[in-house]
Image (tube, rainbow, N blue to C red):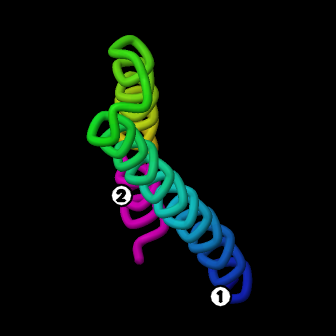
């Protein structure tokens, strides 16, 4: 029984680590998208609608990250409640 509990814990931990890595990578991408939009704006290399589109992409990615953070919180909370650890 103890072995089964540790296997479940390892699977839950792997899910949490995967979500953390995914959020980290997407956060870096969001930051790069935002910085790229600011660079375009400061250099005057693109039109207003191109800058707005770049900002919209960063905002959309931010919403995805927010959803993943909610999933991570729910997953970690469920693991603590259901499994008792």
Q: Is 1 contained in the magenta span? A: no
Where residue 56 appears, as percent x and y from the top left, is 38, 22
Taking 31 as reference, is 25 left or right? right
The span picked out in magenta is 69-85
- At 44% across and 52% down in the image, what residue appears? 32
**The C terminus - image quarter:** bottom left
- Of the numbered discs in the image, which one, if any, rests on residue 79? none
| 36 and 40: which is toward the camera | 40
Q: Quarter-wise, where is residue 1 in the image?
A: bottom right
- At 65% across and 84% down in the image, what residue appears? 6
Q: Residues within 10 Å of mark 2 (few under 14, many from 20)?
A: few
Q: Is 81 contained in the magenta span? A: yes
Taking 16 as reference, is 71 left or right? left
What secondary structure is the stretch in magenta mostly built from? helix
| 47 and 56: which is toward the camera | 47
Q: Dot 1 corresponds to which residue?
A: 2
Q: Quarter-wise, where is residue 15 in the image?
A: bottom right
Q: Nearer the viewer, mark 1 or mark 2?
A: 2
Helix, strand or loop at label 1? It is: helix
Q: Quarter-wise, where is residue 63 in the image?
A: top left
Q: Residue furthest top?
A: 49
Q: Is residue 71 above or below residue 13?
A: above
- At 41% across and 72% down in the image, what residue appears? 84
Q: How much space separates mark 1 and mark 2, taking CA atoms?
A: 21 Å
Taking 10 as reference, is 66 left or right? left
Q: Is residue 29 above or below residue 48?
A: below
Where residue 20 appears, as percent x and y from the top left, is 49, 64
Q: Dot 2 corresponds to which residue?
A: 77
């Amino acid at each position: 029984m103890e072995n089964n509990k540790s296997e479940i814990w390892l699977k839950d931990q792997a899910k949490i680590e995967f979500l953390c890595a995914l959020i980290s990578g997407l956060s870096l991408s969001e930051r790069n998208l935002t910085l790229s939009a600011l660079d375009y704006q400061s250099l005057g290399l693109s039109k207003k609608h191109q800058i707005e589109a770049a900002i919209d992409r960063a905002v959309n990615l931010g919403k995805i990250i927010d959803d993943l953070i909610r999933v991570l919180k729910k997953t970690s909370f469920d693991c603590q409640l259901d499994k008792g650890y």
